[in-house]
Structures are given as C-alpha cells and as structure tokens.
Amino acid sequence: MKAQVDADRCSGHGRCFDVALEFYEPDDEGYNAFRGQTVDIPPGMEDAATAGSRHCPEAAIAILD
Amino acid sequence: MTSHIDPVSREFDVDHHSEEFWESAPETFAMLREKCPVAHSSQHGGFWMLTTYDTVAEAARDDDRFSSYRDLDGSRPGYDGVSLPPSRRPTRTGMIELDPPEFTKYRRLLNASFSPQAVERLRPRILEITTAVLDVVIERGECELVKDVAGPITAAVTMDQLGIPADRGMRYSNTMHDLLSISPTSPGQAAAVAQVEELLGELREQVRLRRAAPQDDWISLLVTAEVDGAPIPDDIVVENAFLLVLGGVDTTSQLILHSLRYLHQNPELREDLREHPERLRNACEEFLRYFSPIQWFARTVTRDCEVDGVDLKAGERVLLCWGSGNHDAAHFEDPEVVNIDRSPNRHMAFGVGVHRCIGSHLARAQFEIVVGEILRRMPDYSVDEGETRPYPDRQVNGLVRMPASFTPGSREALVATEAGSA
C-alpha cells in the first residue's frame, strides 16, 4: 500500500498527523511532510495511514493498493 | 423568515446581515441545502449563496474561478474581496484578499510561526496568561466571560506574538468585538470603522518601531522579510498585522464562549470533559463544526461557470456558507447533534483550500487550555442565560455578553503577570 499526498490540495489543516502521528509528520510550515510524494506504507501502519486520509478536510491523501 | 424558494428562479431574497435571518438560520440553511444549494439573493447588489458542503468546498478550493481579490485601484472593478457588502475600509484585510500566486508569497512567510510545532512551544505561555486572567476573577465568584475572560486571554496571546504591549490588548479586543458584532448596514458601524482606523494608526507606529529595531515577533518577521526581492511596504505589513488581530482575537473567543455555554447547558458532557481533559481535543473539533465561529466569506466569480448545475456569470458575487456546510447531513450524520466522538470530522470551520485559517492550531491550543482551566478552576460555573446575548450580525457567530457565577477559588500565579493586569 502507498499513501499519495496531493501537493495542491494539502493546506496544512494538520488533521492527518493529529490522528496518526505514528505515520504522518508535519514539515516546517505545518503541511504534511509527504506533500507531493507517494510513499510506501510500512507493514503495521495501514490503519494509521488510512485514518489520516479519512480525517483530511481536503481529501488530499489517497491510499493506493 | 421566509422558508420557501422559487426552484426555477432560485431567487431567495435574503439579507445575511439581518437579525431576522439568523433567528431561523438553521432551518433556512437546511431548506436551502435540500432544495437549492445554489440560491440567489437580490440584496447587496445581488449574490449567490452556496450552502452545501460540496458546493462550498468546490468554490473554496478553486481560486481560479472564485477570487478573494479586493480591488483598490479600479483595475479590476467588482472584485470586492471577502466581505459582502464590500468593506468600507480603504485597505485590504491583508493576504486573505489576495489570490495565489501573490497570496502564497505572504502566506509562506508566516506558516512556520503558526505550525503545530510552533504552537506547541507557545502552550506554557498560553497557560501562564490564562492563569493570570482567571486569577483576576477567581476570588469574586462571578465574571462576565466575554470581557473578563475570553477577550483578555485571546487578546493577550495575540498581542504577545505580534509584539504589541500587553496593556493595549483589551483596546484591540474591544474594537474587533465592536467591528464584528455590528451589521455593516447599521449606524453603529461608522463608529466601529473609525475605531479601526485609530488602531491601524497605532499598528503603523508599531511597524515603524520594528523596522528600526526588529524583535522576535510576527510584525518583526514581516518587516524583515522580502517579497519579490524587496522589503514589504509598511502599508502591507499593517494590513496583515491587522488581519492577525482580526483573526486571532474575537473568533477564538467565540469558540470558547459558545462551548462554555453549551457545557453549562449539558452538565453530563461538562463532567465528562472535566474528568477527562484529554477529550477536549476531540470536543474542540466538534464545537468548531457545530458553532462555526466564522459563518461565511465571499468570493467573486472570475469567469462564466457552473456550480451544481447552475450557471454563474463572471463578476457575480458568491457567499461561501461554512457554517451551513458544517451542518450538511450528506457529510455529518445527525448534524444537529453535538457528538464529541464524531470521526472523521472533516469540518470546514477554518475554511478549506489555500486560505485555510493560518491560526487554526493556535485557536485549538487556546481552546484546550482555557476551557480545561475553567473546568478545573470553576467546575460549577453557571451561565446567566437571561443576560446572554448573541451578536446582532452573524458573520462571526458571536456572543456579546455572557455573565457567569461560580464558587470562588484561589489565585494560582505567584506574581501577577503583565497580561493579568491588562
């Protein structure tokens, strides 16, 4: 599984790392540090990655199989 | 208030600044979401009203089609910024009345100061201010929560970060309170605008002082920064400092005040949050959704386009009703019920899109600390509902006055700080 964080959509609400800090981190400006990237979700992190995606008010995080 | 709309013309002659509209706003918004998510009013020169979550989000995320720009020099007539009717002030409300890419240049300068990490570092200072302000009233057993508690705390936090002396805090707080609570069409608005002009003069002086001797604060950050390779002119720094005061003081106060009132009315939830302060974080999100301290912002349509099957023309004005979107049953199950365990809670109380409230994390931290401290130190506070009054105007869903009584407690700070005596 991969998480894809849309660079245009991510607006720094910070809900992703608020609910799933074990997987998502903020960058220096408060955006998702994976902004503009597609990253592998390590085993065991699937639920955290999905929770962060579900909480995003911008629907900026896509979880890809 | 009218509860019918002509589904063909979509005409709905509503004035979103009228008290009668807000008396039945929840029902009216529900009717509009169901029957006509893109409705038209002929008031204030005519405007469209978007009320569903999806239509509001679509417009807010599309700065190319829905502009926040405020024209000041006549080069883009009709681009009246985010107020509706247009603000009477001859200056922009800072960067929120710019579109990308101009907007982004200013936003990037401040993002790091408002990041979750930066706000985390401010928590001890927010607690110190809260302690000092509560100390002033704690032995009395009664207070007026707007001007004795929420106003002074949010003002002190904002002044502290801007680098403005704490003793000016209440002056700023009261001016914002007056400006936001009064309808732009009421006679009192002229006086509020005159007060704002005075504050802008004061901010201009602060900007000059920081330019000469920069310190570690938001104003210094703006005067030492460059945009397009040049320093930011004083006027632009002033309007953005004003924006931070406007955004930082009254809206956060109102989130706290509405929540305290709700908890007074719902003692079981109050007890639950008093015993489990760690649940305040989730509660904050739900109160943000439910009360939506900022109910709407306006945009200008840049080109003929369609929203939810309705044709909008270039130059038309549009109202994005965040508060209504936050009560849309298509996105929130039982939207009229406060459920602090709601998950996910993708509310739009801070807006969506690139203009997302820069102070959102600071507001959340203040909510948690202030509500948490009041539940701890004034656990039996009782709101005098008969003396509690909403704002006549409701762009900010605010309370003018909310007296409360409680069992007196003890002071906790060893030495009163500047903020407490402000």
Image (cartoon, helix red, strand yellow):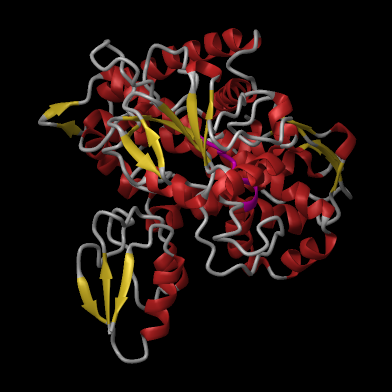
Q: Quadrant of the N terminus of chain B?
A: top right
Q: Can the viewer see residue B415?
A: no
| Residue shown at 43% from the left, 25% from the top | B242
| Residue shown at 85% from the left, 39% from the top | B142
Residue closer to the observer: B380 or B411: B380
Which residue extends farthest left?
B229
Which residue extends farthest bottom?
A43
Residue B163 pos. (x, y %): 42, 32
Magenta range:
B290-296
Q: Quadrant of the C terminus of chain B?
A: top right
| Residue shown at 13% from the left, 26% from the top | B230
Compared across the picture, whether B271 is left or right of A32 comes to right
Residue closer to the observer: B49 or B107: B49
Residue closer to the observer: B3 or B101: B3
What is the quadrant of residue B299 in the picture?
top left
Q: Is residue B294 magenta?
A: yes
Q: Is residue B27 above or below residue B1?
A: below
Residue B110 pos. (x, y %): 31, 41
Identify the main secondary structure in magenta. loop
Compared across the picture, whether B63 is left or right of B375 comes to left
Q: Can the viewer see residue B77?
A: yes
Residue B196 pos. (x, y %): 51, 15
Q: Is residue B244 magenta?
A: no
Residue B305 pos. (x, y %): 32, 37
